[in-house]
Each structure stands twice: as C-alpha cells, then as structure tokens.
Amino acid sequence: MTDYATLLKESGLKATFQRMNMLESIENNGHMSIDAIYEEVVKKHPSLSLATVYKNIILMVENTVLVEVPIEGRKIKYELAKVDHIHLVCTKCGEVEDRPHNVNADAVFSSMTKDENFSLSKQQINLYGVCAHCQEAIAS
Amino acid sequence: MTDYATLLKESGLKATFQRMNMLESIENNGHMSIDAIYEEVVKKHPSLSLATVYKNIILMVENTVLVEVPIEGRKIKYELAKVDHIHLVCTKCGEVEDRPHNVNADAVFSSMTKDENFSLSKQQINLYGVCAHCQEAIAS
DNA sequence: CTCTGTGCAAAGCGTTTGCAAACGA
DNA sequence: TCGTTTGCAAACGCTTTGCACAGAG
C-alpha cells in the first residue's frame, strides 16, 4: 500500500481523485494497458474521460511515477516505477509477473556495456513463455 | 548477404520484389520502423503502397521471418529473425545495436524459470543508455 | 492458368488537442 | 483566488480492409 497523494506531490503533480485511482489500479494489478486502467477507474468515477487517462499516463511517465512496459505483440502496459526487475510474460494469456533482478546477470551487463563506452541507465529483461497456469489449461 | 527469395519460399511466402527489398533494407539497417522501411523501399519501387508494407510485415512476423522489437518510448521496430541476442538501445538517438547473448546470463534465466514451471521460449534483453557516439556529441 | 500479392481509396480506431468548466492547494 | 486538471467533442494519424488488377509459380 502506497501513499499515492504524497507520491504525486513529490513528483510535482496534484493529487487528484483520478490520478490516485489510476495508481491504485495499476499497483493492484501489477501491469495494465491504457484501456484496462480506464475500465477499472471508470467504475469508481463514472464521468471519467479516456482523454484524462491518456493525459495522466503521459504526465506520470514524464515524471517517472509510471514506467512503460513494451511487450511483443501486445498493447503497451504500465507499472509503478521501481527498481529494475525481470518480467515473465505469458505468451498465452498475456499476463506479466515480476521477478527480482538477478545480481549475477546485472554484473554481466554492467561490465559488458562499460567495456564499450555505453553509459547504461536501465536494464529491461522480458522472458517470454507459457505460465504454469496456462500450461495446466492446455494439458486438461 | 542472405538469399531472401529462398528464405521467403521456405516460409511459404512468394518471393515478390517488395518483400525482398523490405528484407534487404531491414538487414542492412539492423532494426527499422514501418515507415522507415516504406521510405527506403519506395525509392526503388515508387508505386509501393504503405498498405503492402503493413500486410507484409504482419505476414512475415506470423511466419517468423521477422521479429518485432518493442522499445520504450519509440515506435516498434522490426529485425530479421535470428538467435537470441541483446539490444543496446540509445535513449538519445534511438539506434539499436545487437550484441551476443551472454551464455552465463542465459543459464541464469533458464534455471530461474525452470524452478517455477514457466516454459521459457524467448529471452528479450534491452539495455538502455547513451551510445558512445551520442556521448561525444553531448561533450562537444 | 491459378492463386497469391499489390495498390488504391475508404473505413476504422486509438490517441491527441482545444477549450470552457471544475477542482486542488 | 490562481494555476492546474478534467471532460467533451472534434481532429489527427496510423493501421486495416475490400476490391479489381497484376504478378509469381
């Protein structure tokens, strides 16, 4: 549970009902597309406009409250900004799960990029496959 | 230099002038967006239609001749299908470079996913930072 | 010769923009 | 109160579709 009002204000954004509910939905679901966010927040706030969601996504990404998660063959999803981690992406259901970013891998990439004068700022690792849940569904 | 005609036929697609030129452009540039591909191929084939490029991209991705490369904050790029590798993405100029996929990292991810019954099929690793070329440009 | 692929123009949709009213601080 | 944010509706631009013609095998 995060204090969204504080998070927003520290990022220089006003803590509106719409923004706090967007953040809450995203945190509860982990990773969401624009329209999934809209669908969920509009339940609590029927007059919500899709345009507002778009505007706020752009603002919150610019202010690094949110991070874009690009996934092969799917709509872009968004997650709360946090330390680098690995995404397990299910190619069946599209769900994304977080896993801690392995320290060994981190060292490998850091030294690799240092060798060639590439100033590394972010590692984005997506592992695609079929999640345990979907494997069961297929087996049955 | 690849034999695009054979590559296409083996994938069950006819070897048209448009498709071969698309593949040639993509291979020469490494990674390209839809409109960059169109801009380059239309030079050799002025009557080319954007719709043809779209249709062929979809077909060639379905037949795994091409692979989608999703990048944070940029338009989707496409590359020729090849073994897993790492993308160095420059956040300044947007250029993408390939690097061999480290064997150690590979082992780490394989065992990690095996532990939890996630059937891993593809690793996608993007490292974001500023390339050597853009660092110079900033310094001067 | 047959079936696939191409080009064009129109349709479709997701996203962005401008503006007046509402709201947060 | 003042500047920011919201909601609406229109505009925009990328992507897709349908169809007649051209081209590959």
Image: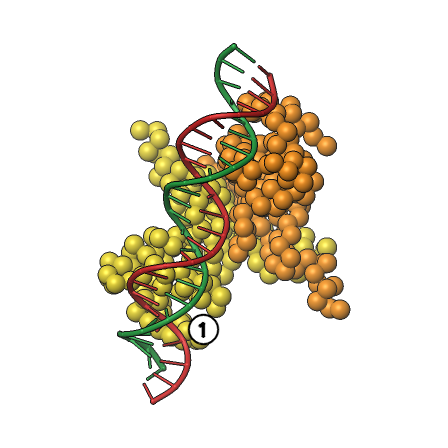
Chain colours: A orange, B yellow, C red, D green
- Residue at image position (42%, 41%) is B90
Q: Amino acid at mark 1?
A: Ser
Quarter of image, res A16: top right
Q: Nearer the viewer, residue B113 or A77?
A: A77
Quarter of image, res B119: bottom right
Left or right for B94, reference B46: right
Left or right for B43, reference A84: left
Q: Nearer the viewer, residue B26 or A62?
A: A62
Residue bearing mark 1: B11
- Residue at image position (60%, 42%) is A38
Q: Position of residue B102 (x, y in %)?
A: 53, 52
- Can see residue A61? no
- Residue at image position (40%, 43%) is B94
Indicate the chain on which mark 1 is placed. B
Q: Position of residue C13 (x, y in %)?
A: 49, 52
Quarter of image, res B34: bottom left
Quarter of the picture holding the N terminus of chain B? bottom left
Q: Few, some or many C-alpha atoms within 10 Å of disc 1 (few <14, some 14-19, many ≥20)? A: some
- Residue at image position (36%, 69%) is B4
**Residue B75 in the image: above or below residue D20:** above
Q: Quick one: SS at disc 1?
A: loop
